[in-house]
Amino acid sequence: MTAVATKATTTTAQKGIDRGVMAVFAGLMLGSLIASLNMTLVAPALPTIVAELGGLADYSWIPISAMLASTIVVPVAGKLSDVYGRKPLYMIGIVVFAVGSALSGLAPNFWFLVFARFVQGAGMGFIMPLSQAIIGDIISPRERGKYQGMMGASFGLASIVGPAAGGFITEHFTWRWLFFVNLPIAALTLIVIWFYMHVPNERRKHAIDVWGSVTLSGGITCVLLATVWGGVQYPWASGQIVGLYAAAALLLAGFVWVELHAPEPVLPLRLWKSSIFTYSNIASIGVAMAMFGAIFFLPVFVQGVIGNSVTNSGAILVPMLVAMIVTSVAGGQFISRTGRYKVPLLVGLALMGAGFYMLSTFDVHTTNQQTIEAMVIIGLGLGLTMQTYTLVVQNSVDRADMAVATSATQLSRSMGAAIGLAILGTILTQGMGASIAKYLPASALHQLQSAGGGATATAVFDPAQLAHLPSAIAAGIRHGLADALHPVFMSLLPIIALAFIATLFIQEVPLRQTAHVAAGRQVAGGSDQAQERS
């Protein structure tokens, strides 16, 4: 009788824990939804946005500004959540993101939109690392692969809807609704989190590393400015560019000094003594560069070279994201069942390399079918890698370092995305002049330049402008754009190779089978029960 009662009590506790986990997870999935929509809705509409607001020469700042803000916020998000609790900071992130979305939709000019996107990115800087930290708190590493696979699938599902919906909304309504659509989703997310997310918080006193955050943010900003402006606004050897890189070096050196002396550094340098942590973050940077390179530069190829509409250029991203969902879920299940994560990572990187090699061979004769095939291969690889490096890092650190290590991994992703977009945009912009000149007579080229279009990548980002050009000139521009995009995609191959080599050096250690804390208020002594359940 006692055994039966004990079994019944254990079963009740088990159900309580499961309900608590799923309630928390529902809020995290919604947060992931709005963050992923923010990226995928806007990507296919960039040409239309910059055509209306102006600022064609600086178009890459629309995605870069959001990534920069996320990079600045991510390092302190985890530390602040240790002080004030995961739930309040997560909700603040959603509110900030919603404010940025509203401002973006109301933007009267290009640089106001860049500022509004910066606000959005600050919100994302709270949402993304805290969602991973909360999962790390309440779910054991052995089970975490399954849940992180579902998070990856959530990103993929939103990404499927995002590009196609973004193109449709832009073409049939206005691009401003791409940002307004985030508001009802954000409101629903706040309601779910307020009533159902109960995450235990072990509040501890912390010293916020202000100077570490300032020097890191300043250094990254200088690197981005120099990379985007170099060879475009200013010559590479100019005082402005050299000065920015010099300032970046000084600020980053100052960051290292601050971190060595700060009582609680924003990015503890001791974490880098772990080869698992170091190699995982190196690989994460490469994966982020490849991922955002695909999301933001494939629409350029599809619209500018193949000649698809905004709606079609968004829809053509869907196969890549469907493939990402499939392998994200399957890879998560494989990791949870076997406890092995290195093979899926290596397979995923190999697939990504194969996909980008295919992209680097594309030209004006490339068809939609060929593009889709390459994108499916890339998507399969992204699904296996995108979430797994976070799992690897979380499994290698103690509870005290969980939030800061998770934030560091998200920081690596944000840095990879921002710097990658800056580098790829610079390669494309600088290559356009020589590429177009090969296919157009000097008189036609001069006419384009004097009309204000210029022989740059941004001259072909406006489909309406191309529609009014003589067919021979339009064909020449498409040939030039195809040639200019070749080194963009080719440059990602050594980056993926570096990520592959770094992953080879990651030591595969057993995944823990216990969570740090239990989710939900309804389970007393949940941590012990969670361990028994494992």
Image (cartoon, helix red, strand yellow):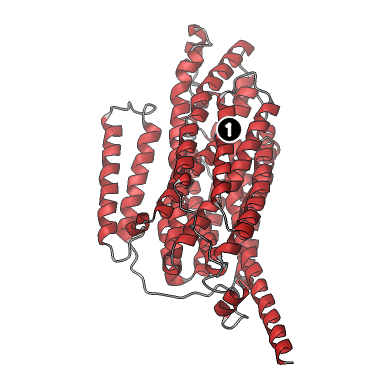
Q: Is residue 65 visible?
A: no
| The N terminus sits in image quarter | bottom right
Where residue 439 sits: x, y (%)?
53, 11
Total of numbered circles in the picture? Answer: 1
| The C terminus sits in image quarter | bottom right
What is the secondary structure assignment of the residue under circle 1? helix
Q: Is residue 444 left or right of residue 168?
A: left
Where residue 293 sits: x, y (%)?
53, 36
Q: Is residue 129 above or below residue 314?
A: below
Label 1: few (<14), some or many (≥20) within 10 Å?
some
Residue sitting at x 26%, y 39%: 246
Residue nearest the viewer, comparing 29 with 445 = 29
Q: Quadrant of residue 238?
A: top left
Residue sitting at x 65%, y 22%: 366
Name the residue beneath numbered marker 1: 354
Residue nearest the viewer, comparing 486 with 447 = 486
Tell me which amino acid carries mark 1.
Ala
Q: Is residue 442 left or right of residue 49?
A: left
Residue sitting at x 58%, y 13%: 473
Where residue 264 sits: x, y (%)?
32, 65
Name the residue at the bottom extreme.
Answer: 1
Q: Is residue 144 above or below residue 528?
A: above
Residue nearest the viewer, comparing 11 with 311 = 11
Q: Is residue 312 visible?
A: yes
Where residue 33 sits: x, y (%)?
62, 54
Residue nearest the viewer, comparing 526 with 72 = 526
